[in-house]
Image (tube, rainbow, N blue to C red):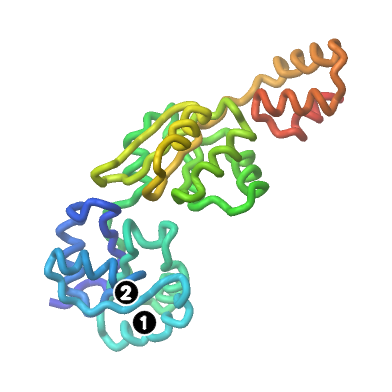
Amino acid sequence: MKRKFDFYIVPTPIGNISDITLRAIEVLKEVDIIACEDSRVTQKLLNHYDIKTKCISYHKYNERERVNSILKTLKDGKTMALVSDAGTPMICDPGSILISELKKNNIKITSLPGACAVTTFLSQISRETEEFKFVGFLPKSETQIAELYSENKFTNMVFYDSPNRILKTLKILQTKNPAIRIAIGRELSKLFEEIIIDDIEKVIKHFSNTEIKGEFVCMTFAQEKQDLSELKDKILKLKEQGFKAKEITEIVSTLYGINKNEIKNLLY
């Protein structure tokens, strides 16, 4: 029986190989071709579920060059599925260029629900509000990370990080707000899954004394908005004690994690 759709976006397990839906297995068995990031990774999953479907590579280094051949395959009447190494394609994984082109060419596309590190993580994190902002992997430079946090400090900011970068990232965030509270998950759905929710100083200490493995999902808890009238009073007291504007800016920024430009506005 001909399927309703030509192209399927299929989530795969983020750790535990059993975390895949019956529908996903069915689709992967019945499509003609599976486009995957790394065939060695995907083949392990396919072998486990006795899926014989042919695979082709589709990753961030060959996205553009693959588009035309995939489009031709679909127009020739074949069906395809897109998978990433783990989790849901298009969530910090390749696919955006391809999906855009397929939609332009009226290819019938659908997405299957399934594993995603963000939702798996957040379902274990109690928050005062449902609002959060997912920013993907953080930029590499210290300045960019600091700016990104400053832009999102009043919301729950969720991001991915790697084991070789996580300590550096935490220390950068600590310089922006020493009182920041953070939640961190690693090895989600695996044997050594770990979730930590604590003040950033304690989280840094924890990971400084342990071997760091696994991919990380993190969330900085939203900072409460300061009462500016109360802050003005604190600034006035510092002025009365003889502190200079530059010193006051540094003190208030360090203690309350407030942007220095905001403090300067209150100084004059």
Residue at left 66%, top 23%?
Answer: 255
Distance of mark 1 from mark 2, alpha carbons? 9 Å
Q: Are marks 1 and 2 in contact (CB under 8 Å)?
A: yes
Residue at left 33%, top 38%?
Answer: 194
Residue 120 visible, this orientation: yes
Residue 131 visible, this orientation: no
Residue identified by numbered label 2: 35
SS at badge 1? helix
Q: Is residue 148 above or below residue 235?
A: below
Callout count: 2
Q: Amino acid at mark 1?
A: Ile
Residue at left 80%, top 11%?
Answer: 237
SS at badge 2? strand
Task: Kindly report which numbered mark, 1 or 2, lies closer to the viewer in this rendering.
Answer: 2
Would residue 260 appear left or right of 101 to someone viewing this image?
Answer: right
Question: In the figure, residue 39 lies in which quadrant?
Answer: bottom left
Q: Residues within 10 Å of mark 1 (few under 14, many from 20)?
A: many
**Residue 13 x %, y %:** 26, 55
Of 206 and 94, nearer the camera is: 206
Q: Is residue 87 above or below residue 249?
A: below
Q: Quadrant of the N terminus?
A: bottom left
**Residue 238 x %, y %:** 80, 15
Of 105 and 114, nearer the camera is: 114
Residue identified by numbered label 1: 70
Among numbered discs 1 and 2, the one appearing first in the sequence: 2
Would residue 189 appear left or right of 204 to someone viewing this image?
Answer: left
Q: Is residue 139 above or below residue 55?
A: above
Q: Amino acid at mark 2?
A: Ala
